[in-house]
């Protein structure tokens, strides 16, 4: 089973670029670690990002245009992750890589990614939906601190950490306070808090990291449940992403979610990521586990 969607606390001291860096062990073998201040499970977006970064270490010049991955087992933040890269194909137009993430000799995650050279051609895109501008919305962490001002000391200690991704939304984290069902749609503005630098590949890697945020919660909205609902079980199962345009993820982007289906203990969520000027830079899809455990 996968990493559940957890609060993003990585990188409070280091930049996210530093946090995601890999050590090369052999030609196609890399090692990554998780910050000491991580929650009980590794955040799924971290493994996506580090797997993509491992693949990039074996690719010359070309740019990732899509990735497809499965979460297999929960990741242990106290154990390094070994990333094994299979150089599946180097073709005339496309390069394909497969990455397997391993802990204690077992797969926790795998990713397949395709890379190509940029080219000119046909072009169309969906329009960015209307909604509140990021400048009119509060920082998500400020909202959480206000919500939990009477929380236990340990929770307040967690809230003192500055997450690497800044997020602003109307109700993405607070919708469940009143317990009322809502439509399975949401909008979030987000960006990387710390400088990423000039490497366009790293902007893409960190966008992939952030793409795992707030997805499954959108599928929960019609049922009035959330991560702390007694008996509720959730986890990301798979994740797919298509990169349409290069972008600067130190700038604000709008992440639009909708969930067209939930059945058989699973919820499907679709996402579109727009730059502030309305350019569609990426599309996302994820399926997650959603079930209520039988009461004893």
Image (tube, rainbow, N blue to C red):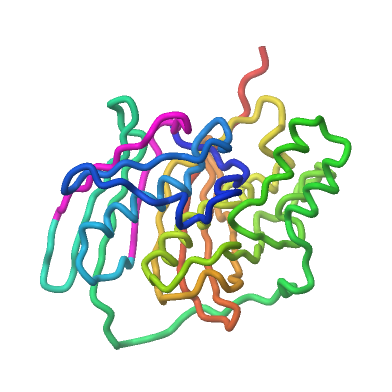
Image spot of residue 44 (x, y percent): 47, 44
Furthest toward the right, the residue is: 150
Q: Residue at x 44, y 33 (%)?
A: 75
Q: How many marks?
A: 0
Q: Please, what is the dominant secondary structure of the magenta stretch?
A: strand
Q: Residue at x 44, y 67 (%)?
A: 203
Image spot of residue 215 (x, y percent): 57, 52
Q: Which residue is drawn at 55% across and 76% down?
A: 275
Furthest toward the front, the residue is: 13
**Extent of the magenta region:** 66-88
Image spot of residue 18 (x, y percent): 45, 53
- Look at the picture and state if 187 lies above or below 23: below
- Look at the picture and state if 80 lies above or below 19: above
Q: Residue at x 55, y 49 (%)?
A: 11
Side (left or right) of 230 relative to 91: right
Side (left or right) of 152 relative to 293: right
Q: 101 or 239: which is nearer to us?
A: 101
- Look at the picture and state if 78 lies above or below 29: above
Residue 84 painted magenta: yes
Image spot of residue 71 (x, y percent): 40, 39
Query: If the image is split into quadrants, where does the C terminus sit?
Result: top right
Side (left or right) of 120 relative to 37: left
Q: 2 or 15: which is nearer to us?
A: 15
- Look at the picture and state if 123 lies above or below 208: below
Q: 204 or 240: which is nearer to us?
A: 204
Query: If the image is split into quadrants, where does the N terminus sit?
Result: top left
Side (left or right) of 258 relative to 284: right
């Amino acid at each position: 089973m996968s990493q559940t969607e957890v609060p993003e606390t990585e990188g409070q001291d280091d930049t996210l670029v530093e946090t995601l860096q890999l050590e090369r062990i052999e030609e196609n073998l890399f090692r990554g670690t998780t910050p000491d201040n991580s929650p009980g499970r590794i955040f799924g977006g971290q493994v996506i990002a580090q797997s993509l970064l491992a693949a990039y270490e074996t690719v010359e010049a070309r740019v990732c245009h899509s990735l497809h991955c499965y979460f297999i087992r929960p990741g242990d933040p106290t154990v390094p992750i070994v990333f094994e890269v299979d150089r599946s194909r180097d073709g005339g137009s496309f390069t394909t890589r497969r990455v397997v993430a391993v802990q204690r000799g077992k797969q926790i995650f795998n990713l397949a990614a395709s890379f190509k050279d940029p080219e000119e051609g046909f072009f169309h895109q969906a329009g960015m939906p209307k909604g509140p501008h990021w400048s009119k919305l509060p920082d998500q962490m400020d909202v959480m601190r206000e919500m939990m001002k009477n929380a236990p000391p340990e929770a307040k200690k967690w809230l003192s950490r500055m997450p690497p991704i800044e997020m602003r939304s109307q109700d993405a984290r607070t919708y469940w306070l009143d317990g009322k069902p809502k439509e399975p749609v949401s909008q979030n503005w987000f960006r990387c808090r710390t400088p990423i630098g000039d490497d366009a590949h790293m902007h893409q890697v960190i966008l992939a990291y952030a793409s795992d945020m707030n997805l499954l919660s959108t599928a929960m909205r019609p049922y009035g449940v959330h991560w702390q609902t007694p008996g509720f079980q959730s986890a990301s199962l798979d994740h797919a992403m298509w990169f349409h345009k290069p972008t600067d993820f130190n700038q604000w982007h709008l992440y639009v979610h909708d969930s067209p289906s939930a059945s058989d203990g699973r919820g499907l969520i679709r996402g579109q990521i727009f730059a502030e000027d309305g350019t569609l830079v990426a599309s996302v899809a994820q399926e997650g586990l959603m079930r209520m455990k039988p009461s004893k």
